[in-house]
Image (tube, rainbow, N blue to C red):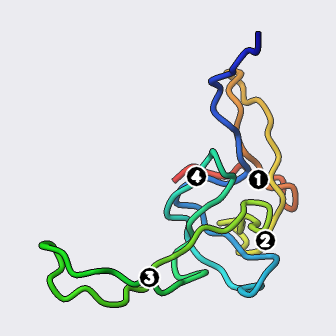
Amino acid sequence: MKKTDKKQKKFHIKKGDTVKIIAGDAKGKTGKILSIVTSDNKAFVEGINVVSKHTKPTAASPNGGIIKKEAPIHISNLMLVDPAKGQATRVGRKADSKGKLERYSKKTGEVIKNG
């Protein structure tokens, strides 16, 4: 019998973080994370990896046509931008005084505020 863990995956980035693309066609660009797909280890980044999607006419959009929208990028190709310094940094986790884990910048050592 196989056990299935229902634990939530922990990533170095969260929704709302500013990230830098470190690989692929958009290498070097920065953007804000719109959402994260935990099952696929991918994230949607605002204005990055924009694709054209062809849509049929429906009641909601009677004309149909071509829509530009963001496609997901693998999380390994994203690096968090430190809000204090504005530079890309690796992320570490350490326990605060209450024992709760908090993210910190490996480059500066400062705690990264959520949201």
Say what amino acid the circle numbered 4 marks: Val
User: Would you name the residue on which mark 4 appears?
Assistant: 37
Work out whether residue 32 or residue 113 is closer to the camera in this orientation and state it: 32
Say what amino acid the circle numbered 1 marks: Glu
Say what amino acid the circle numbered 2 marks: Ala
Work out whether residue 95 or residue 55 is closer to the camera in this orientation and state it: 55
Based on the displayed image, in which of its 4 quarters is residue 6 positioned? top right
Say which residue appears at 65% left-offset and 26% top-offset: 7
The numbered mark at residue 53 is 3
Q: Is residue 31 left or right of residue 94?
A: left
Residue located farthest toward the front when viewing the structure as drawn: 56
User: Would you name the residue on which mark 1 appears?
Assistant: 110
Say which residue appears at 71% left-offset and 47% top-offset: 11
Query: Residue 31 at x, y = what percent?
Result: 59, 76
Q: Nearer the viewer, mark 4 or mark 3?
A: 3
- Determine whether the residue tagged by mark 2 lies in a helix, strand or loop: loop
Say what amino acid the circle numbered 3 marks: Lys
Name which of mark 4 and mark 3 comes first in the sequence. 4
Say which residue appears at 79% left-offset and 40% top-offset: 93
Work out whether residue 39 or residue 53 is closer to the camera in this orientation and state it: 53
Q: Nearer the viewer, mark 3 or mark 2?
A: 3
Q: Is residue 70 left or right of residue 92?
A: left
The N terminus, quarter of image: top right
Query: Residue 68 at x, y = what percent?
Result: 43, 85
Marks 4/1 in contact by CB < 8 Å: the verdict is: no
User: Would you name the residue on which mark 2 appears?
Assistant: 88
